[in-house]
Amino acid sequence: MHNTAVSHALEYASGLLGEGAWCEGESITLADLALVSALTYLDLRQSERDWRGTHANLAAWFARISARPSVIASNTRSVREMLIYSSSPQKRGSSAFISLGSRLMKQLSID
């Protein structure tokens, strides 16, 4: 059931993004920050899932947004935190995921 929900969420995000540069409109929004956080967390928790192979538009978008200074700075610390907590209860991993989103919002101005 969980894998089906993740697959549906990826299909939905891919469909909404289409060929657009951003999730909503002509500039980065909270939707983009939420999606990059979710995909980063998905890579950590389900590294075997080939979402890039089945959703080329999300893969291209993810590569683009991941190159932004705010995402690089946020991911460096947050991914390390998520790896530390990955053997702990899921709640702690989720806290690191939320922390990533918070850091992205704070650092958005450096891009």
Image (spheres, rainbow, N blue to C red):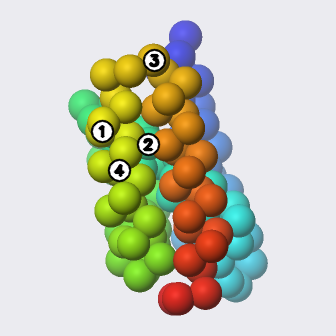
Image position, residue 43 (x, y; %): 34, 42
Task: State the residue lying farthest toward the left.
Answer: 48
Q: Quadrant of the N terminus?
A: top right
Q: Which mark is residue 111?
A: none
Q: Is residue 95 visible?
A: yes
Q: Is residue 20 left or right of residue 3?
A: right
Q: Residue at x 56, y 51 (%)?
A: 99
Q: Which residue is mark 4?
A: 79
- Measure the alpha-carbon separation of dots 2 and 3: 15 Å
Q: Which of the labelled discs sits on residue 41, or is there none?
A: 2
Query: Are the residues at dot 4 and dot 3 in contact (C-beta closer than 8 Å)?
Result: no
Amino acid type assigned to the residue bearing label 3 in the image: Pro
Q: CA distance from mark 4 to mark 1?
A: 6 Å
Residue at 59% in and 79% down: 108
Q: Is residue 35 visible?
A: no
Secondary structure, mark 4, is helix
Residue receiving disc 3:
89
CA distance for labels 1 and 3: 12 Å
Q: Residues within 10 Å of mark 4 (few under 14, many from 20)?
A: some
Of callouts 4 and 2, the N-terminal one: 2
Residue 66 x/y as whole percent: 39, 69
**Marks 3 and 2: in contact by CB < 8 Å?**
no
Q: Are marks 4 and 1 in contact (CB under 8 Å)?
A: yes
- Image disc number at residue 83: 1
Q: Do tag 4 and tag 2 residues touch (Cβ < 8 Å)?
A: no
Q: Secondary structure at mark 2?
A: helix
Q: Is residue 12 above or below residue 93?
A: below
Is 90 in front, or is 37? 90
Q: Earlier in the sequence, mark 4 or mark 3?
A: 4
- What amino acid does circle 2 point to? Tyr
